[in-house]
Image (cartoon, rainbow, N blue to C red):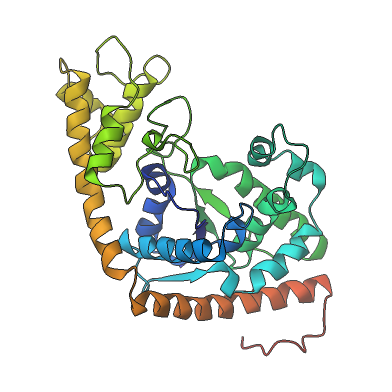
Amino acid sequence: MSRVFSGVQPTGNIHIGNYLGALKQFVDLQNDHECVYCIVDMHAMTVPKSAEELRNSILDVAALYLAIGIDPEKSIVFVQSDVPGHAELGWMLTCNSYTGELSRMTQYKQKSKNKESAPTGLFMYPVLMAADILLYDAALVPVGDDQKQHIELTRDLAIRVNGKYGEDTFVVPEGSYMKSGARVMALDDPTSKMSKSAENEMSRISLMDSPAKIKKAIMRATTDSDGIIRFDIENKPGISNLLSIYSAFSGKTVADLEKEYDGSGYGTLKKDLVEVVVDALTPFQEKYNEIRHSDELIRILQNGAEKANAISEKTIARVKKNLGMGTGAGRKLTF
């Protein structure tokens, strides 16, 4: 089976856009791929937070992975900083990347906009992300469509290093993007992507939100004034966003929903959507609460780190050999 890698930052507020855009793929892919799923705590350090907050957020995301259906018997689940190879390979890739290509990264430009200076970690973030992927010889990377530029950079770095040091140095990965629901928009501004960091909490639906909060967010969602339920992203972005969410969680096509709600008002659509979303998220929340503070969660992460280290050490040894680094004395290899 080909190997899959992906990761999620422990930054809280994981929302339905994250789930539909990437996390849902994690579950689907584990049935016929070798899957490696990471909580990328080293990436989270680009935004300052206390040690206690970071530690709790790591366990929150790990519990959420399991709650949505990731099976630790099928997939490797671990914390990024428990595997030293991420930082080690990150430096090797840093030495093969260029400031020009990193300065063109859209997310860096957005997050550093109007700032005289930005954290170096924010600038180097895409290189560490590339190391995360290449460390596991991943053939496929399930991510939201907003990560396409990062996947392209990862491919460019892999191809560049392969051209210099040997075609067997890295597996060149492909991105896997959801065909529908991949870009869930903000409820208060349907022209912008739903975001974990948006100031308005009503702009998103987080996976752990209560039914009351979900209802409040959906009923307040921005629509338009013509009263017609029709999918038209350009002219009716708000209603189109609600129909996309409804379709993704219910399994009904947007066309079927347009027929079902023909002649109905926006209030009826929103009320029904509340029920659909609450019904979809309730099982996740029940599983999360069951495992979040259990010893089993820690055991799963420790076992996952052991398995991830076993894979990463082989990759690091191969890359160092191809690059002419070291003597091999520092690692006991088992091929």
Q: Is residue 278 above or below residue 37?
A: above
Residue 168: x and y in percent read: 70, 67
Position of residue 59 in the picture relative to residue 289 (left or right): right
**Observer-nearest of 172 and 227:** 227
Position of residue 89 in the picture relative to residue 199 (left or right): right
Does residue 4 appear in the picture of this structure?
Answer: no
Residue 152: x and y in percent read: 64, 46
Position of residue 212 in the picture relative to residue 36 (left or right): left
Q: How many marks?
A: 0
Quadrant occupied by the N terminus: bottom left
Position of residue 26 in the picture relative to residue 328 (left or right): left
- State the residue at coordinates (20%, 40%): 276
Q: Is residue 300 above or below residue 145?
A: below
Residue 109: x and y in percent read: 69, 36
**Observer-nearest of 206 and 137:** 206
Does residue 214 appear in the picture of this structure?
Answer: yes
Q: Is residue 297 above or below residue 161?
A: below
- State the residue at coordinates (82%, 80%): 326
Residue 322: x and y in percent read: 78, 72
Quadrant occupied by the C terminus: bottom right
- State the residue at coordinates (50%, 58%): 10
